[in-house]
């Protein structure tokens, strides 16, 4: 039987000529996509099952040409996507992409190494160690979190992994004193604005659900934690014979962009031997700008810090920086040393060698450092600061437009590039009615296909979130979205004579 042609291309799946040709086809496809993405509805009107109905029940027996596959991507898949790279995507948090991020991802994927140990790819391990130190310096972290200062960092896929790993480290540190049965006494603290990942992570590492404290915040503190509220919870637990374990301080919460007071919480954590983690998943990118670095004042009191370059730092998914002050605390909880992974070379057995398998949950891992390194090399610190500041300026313009229109209220101060707003109640006591009005407003905006936003609920109020941060977003897109919001507000019943429009 012949072994040439499309059906048997798997036998030469890395032929350099084929690789170059098909890669060019994919790049051209994506270039066309980015060129046209602004014309697509941001969120598709796609019914459940719409794609499955177009797909066969089984994979093809014989391979097909790349041009056929790309055509089906264009006709079947792209129309049913929510377009996260649209300049009019303002939902959740941004999920950045860039030419440099894509180039770094291509290099990482193309080289396709698995740098779980230094011996498995020495340059990858050393590049990652250098890049996390670079990022730590850019965001203003104390030296104790850098390899050069006795700490260190790792690139994870998401904050979720960083949280589970640091919770495991904190747990094992505590149980070394208490004994394993002490796990039932360990308590984790976070605010009602903290990401749900902390509750999930606590359950994964064995903390009883009843030992997770969700501490209320209020508008008076800008929806940030206060040291007094945490102290009250901690002291009550200590009086009950429980052991405070782990406290999350967030810089830029998901719902409102609130900031917890890192220094105050750090001092409290140190008095009680609590592991303090600073979660800056979204707003960490803004910390490269000196005007935002006061938000992590007191970080030298923390045990760990994390931020996600894939959100707002032009680094394609996925990439999360985790720094720890004590690498030994992390690796003692996560390390494995089977014989088949033993380093047998003399050079890799020395002190100070980093094996990243012991800094994460999984064994295998991609070459994420290549991607972040290319972004940093291509755009530089000055370029990235200009990028972040542009989005902050756009968000502030939108906030000012809301404040000048009497129909709207800004719910929480815009600290970074997240704007939270709602239509005001027209009369005292009509909260349910105005919540319904805001729900209809959000549905109308998203159904238009001309923008996409998401919501939050705080103090029982339905709030609309506009997270500015797309790589392709320009001020004109923010202006257009403001006009869209005004238009849809009138459609859903907000009174025109209550407005005082920004000129």
Image (cartoon, rainbow, N blue to C red):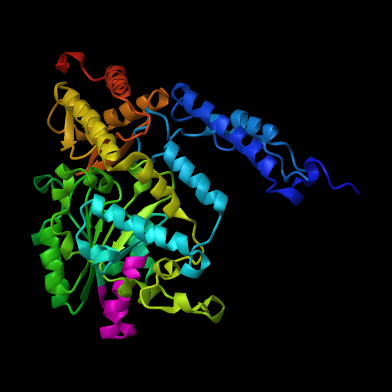
Q: Residue furthest right?
A: 1
Q: Quadrant of the C terminus?
A: top left
User: What residue do we see at 46% from left, 59% from top?
Assistant: 124
In the image, residue 27 lies in the stretch drawn in magenta: no
Q: Is residue 494 above or below residue 392?
A: above
- Residue 409 locus on image (x, y percent): 16, 30
* Number of residue marks: 0
Is 115 in front, or is 73? 115
The answer to whether residue 339 shows anywhere in this view is yes
Q: Which picture quadrant has residue 500?
A: top left
Q: Residue furthest front?
A: 347
18 on left or right of 217: right
Q: Which picture quadrant has residue 411?
A: top left
- Residue 74 locus on image (x, y percent): 60, 29
Q: Is residue 367 above or below residue 302?
A: above
User: What residue do we see at 45% from left, 30% from top?
Assistant: 43
In the image, residue 176 lies in the stretch drawn in magenta: yes
Is 358 in front, or is 132? 132
Q: Which residues are magenta?
A: 165-186
Q: Which picture quadrant has residue 189?
A: bottom left
The answer to whether residue 52 shows anywhere in this view is no
User: What residue do we see at 41% from left, 25% from top?
Assistant: 447
- Residue 399 locus on image (x, y percent): 19, 29
- Residue 215 locus on image (x, y percent): 19, 58
């Amino acid at each position: 039987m012949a072994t040439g042609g499309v059906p048997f291309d798997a036998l030469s799946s890395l032929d350099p000529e084929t690789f170059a040709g098909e890669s060019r086809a994919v790049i051209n496809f994506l270039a066309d996509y980015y060129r046209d993405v602004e014309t697509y509805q941001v969120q598709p009107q796609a019914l459940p099952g719409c794609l499955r109905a177009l797909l066969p029940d089984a994979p093809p027996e014989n391979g097909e040409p790349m041009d056929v596959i790309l055509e089906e991507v264009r006709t079947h898949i792209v129309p049913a996507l929510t377009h996260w790279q649209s300049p009019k995507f303002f939902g959740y948090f941004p999920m950045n992409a860039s030419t440099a991020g894509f180039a770094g991802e291509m290099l990482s994927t193309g080289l396709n190494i698995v740098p779980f140990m230094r011996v498995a790819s020495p340059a990858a391990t050393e590049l990652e160690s250098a890049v996390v130190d670079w990022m730590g310096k850019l965001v203003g972290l104390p030296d104790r979190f850098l390899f050069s200062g006795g700490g260190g960092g790792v690139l994870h896929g998401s904050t979720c992994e960083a949280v589970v790993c640091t919770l495991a480290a904190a747990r094992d540190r505590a149980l070394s004193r208490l004994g394993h049965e002490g796990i039932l006494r360990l308590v984790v603290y976070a605010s009602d604005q903290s990401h749900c990942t902390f509750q999930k992570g606590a359950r994964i590492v064995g903390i009883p659900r009843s030992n997770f404290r969700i501490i209320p915040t209020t508008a008076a503190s800008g929806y940030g934690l206060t040291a007094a509220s945490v102290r009250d919870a901690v002291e009550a637990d200590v009086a009950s014979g429980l052991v405070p374990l782990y406290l999350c301080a967030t810089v830029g919460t998901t719902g409102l962009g609130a900031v917890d007071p890192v220094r105050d919480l750090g001092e409290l954590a140190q008095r009680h031997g609590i592991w303090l983690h600073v979660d800056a998943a979204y707003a960490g990118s803004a910390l490269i700008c000196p005007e935002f670095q006061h938000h992590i004042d007191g970080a030298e009191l923390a045990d760990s810090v994390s931020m996600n370059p894939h959100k707002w730092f032009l680094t394609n998914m996925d990439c999360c920086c985790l720094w720890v002050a004590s690498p030994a605390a992390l690796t003692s909880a996560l390390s494995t040393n089977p014989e088949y992974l033993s380093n047998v070379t003399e050079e890799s057995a020395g002190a100070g060698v980093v094996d990243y398998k012991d800094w994460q949950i999984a064994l295998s891992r991609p070459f994420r450092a290549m991607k972040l390194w290319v972004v940093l090399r291509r755009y530089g610190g000055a370029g990235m600061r200009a990028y972040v500041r542009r989005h902050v300026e756009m968000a502030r313009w939108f906030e000012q437009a809301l404040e000048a229109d009497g129909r709207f209220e800004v719910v929480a101060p815009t600290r970074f590039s997240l704007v939270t707003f709602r239509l005001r109640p027209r009369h005292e006591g009509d909260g349910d009615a105005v919540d319904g009005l805001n729900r209809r407003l959000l549905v109308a905006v998203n159904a238009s296909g001309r923008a996409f936003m998401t919501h939050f609920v705080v103090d029982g109020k339905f709030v609309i979130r506009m997270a500015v941060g797309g790589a392709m977003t320009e001020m004109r897109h923010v202006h257009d979205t403001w006009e869209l919001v005004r238009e849809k507000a009138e459609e859903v019943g907000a009174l025109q004579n209550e407005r005082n429009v920004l000129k």
